[in-house]
Amino acid sequence: MDGLITAAARALAMGDAIGALNRVALRNDAPALALRGIAMAQLGDLSRAKLLVRRAARAFAPKDVVARARCVVVEADIALASRDLAWSSKKLAAAAETLEAHGDRANAAHARHLEARRLLLIGRLDEAARKLAAIDLLALTPALRAIHELALAGIAMRRIEAAAAGAALGRAEEAARWAGIPALAAEVEQAVTMLDTPVARRIAHGEDRALLLADVEALFASKALVVDACRNLVRGRDILVPLARRPVLFALARALGEAWPQDVTRDGLLARAFGARHADESHRARLRVEIGRLRRQLKPLARIDATKRGFVLSPLAGREIVVLAHPVEERHAALLALLADGQSWSGSALALALGASQRTVQRALKDMADAGKVQSYGRGRAQRWMTPPLPGFATSLLLAAPLPGG
C-alpha cells in the first residue's frame, strides 16, 4: 500500500472524509476508488459512493479476495445508510467469513454488525441480539465498540428496557470518546437524548401525560391493565391479548379503557368502532356481537358489563386501567415514526420494516405527500422518502477500519 493510500485510509478511520479525498481524488486505481467511495458515503452522497465502490470491486484482481470482501461490506453499509434493506445477507455473511479467515477481524465484526442493525430496523429483535452476541468483542476497535453498544441500546429501547439501554449508551459514550470521531460521538449523543424524550402518552382518569421510556417500563411492570395503542394489544402483568388483527375489537377496548371507571354509551362505542354517525338496529346488533367477542378475548384480564347507557370495562383483581398511546397520533403514525430517523427510505424498505404490503405503503406515502408531511426524490426503484426539510444522512456508522490492503 503506498503512502497516499495509507494516509487516506487513516483519515477515513478518523472520520476525515475531506482529508481522504485530498489524497486520492485524482486516482482511479482500485484502492483509491474504494476509499473515494467511503469518503463520499461519509459526506452523504450515497449514490456516488455506491458507484465508486462497485467500480473498485470490479477493479480489484480476483486474487484480492480480502479487498473484494471489504467492498461487499462497504456496499452493504451504504445500502443500510440509505435504508435499502433488500441487499443479500448471504453475500455479506460470505464476505465476513472471508475477512475472518484472512485475519481482518475488525471488518468481519463490522459486517456482522450491519446484519444485526438491519434485523433491528425490521423489528427482528431476537435475531439481532443473537448476531450481536456472537461477535468477538476483543476484535472491536473503539469505534466498532461504540457501534456495538448503540445496537444493543436500540434493542433494549425496543424491548422497553430503559436501564439496559442507558447502560449500553454509557458504554457507547466511553467508546466514542476513545475513538475520537466527532460524527460518531454526535450519533451516540443523539441516541442518549432519546432516553429523555417522551415515547408515549398515558391516558387515565381523563388525564393525558407524556411518558419517558423508563416510565413505560415501570407501567408494564405494575399491576395496571394496559390498553396498549402503540402495539394494539391489551396487557396484564403476565398476559398479552393481541388485537392488531382485530381493529374493531381494539377500538372498543380503547374506548372503554379511556372512559374507565365510567361507562361508554352505545352510540359512543358505535362511533369509535364503526364510524357510525346515525346508528340503526343493524349497528346495535353488530355492536352486541363485537362486545361478545371482546369479552371472550379479555376474559383472563377483565369483564365487560352492560349498563343502562352502554358498557363498562371492569378489571379483575381491582386493577387500574391505563391507555398507552403514541406521543402524536394520526392515521400514518407508524410510517412517520420510521421516517423521523432522518434517513431516506425506499418504499420497499418501509414495507419490510412495517410488515405491510408495498401497495399499502405506497398509498399511505402518497396521502402523506399530498398533505405535505413527507417528500420524495428519484423515480422507480431509486425513489426515496423522507420527512421535510431534507435531513442529512447519519453516516457515522460507515466502515470504521481502512478498506484497502492487508
Image (spheres, helix red, strand yellow):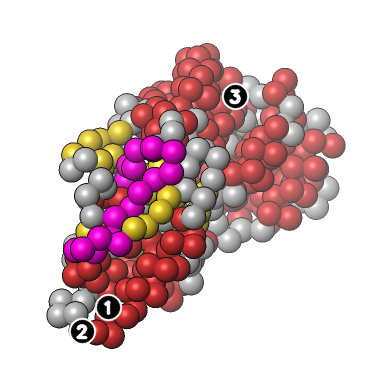
Circles 1 and 2, Cβ within 8 Å, touching? The answer is yes
Q: Secondary structure at mark 1?
A: helix
Left or right: 235 in relation to 54: left
Residue 384 appears at what percent x and percent y? 39, 62
Residue range highlighted in magenta: 306-326
Q: Within the image, what quadrant is residue 91 found in?
A: bottom right
**Which one is in front in this view, the residue at disc 3 or the one at disc 2?**
2
Please, what is the three-letter code of the amino acid marked with disc 2?
A: Asp
In the image, what residue occupies the spot 59% across and 24% down?
145
In percent of width and height, residue 15 lies at 47, 29
Element under label 2? loop
- Residue found 63% across the figure and 22% down from its top: 141
Mark 1 = which residue?
A: 284
Expressed as whole percent of the image width and height from the top left, the position of residue 228 reads 39, 48
- In this rendering, would 190 be left or right of 358? left
Distance from disc 3 to disc 1, alpha carbons, whole Å, reads: 59 Å
Residue ID for mark 2: 280
**Residue 116 visible, this angle:** yes
Residue occupied by mark 3? 145
Q: Nearer the viewer, residue 110 or 223?
A: 223
Ranked by sequence position, the earlier of labels 3 and 2 is 3
Q: Amino acid at mark 3?
A: Arg
Quadrant where the image shows the N terminus: top right
| Residue type, label 1 | Arg
How far apart in space, not on screen, are marks 3 and 2 (Cα)? 63 Å
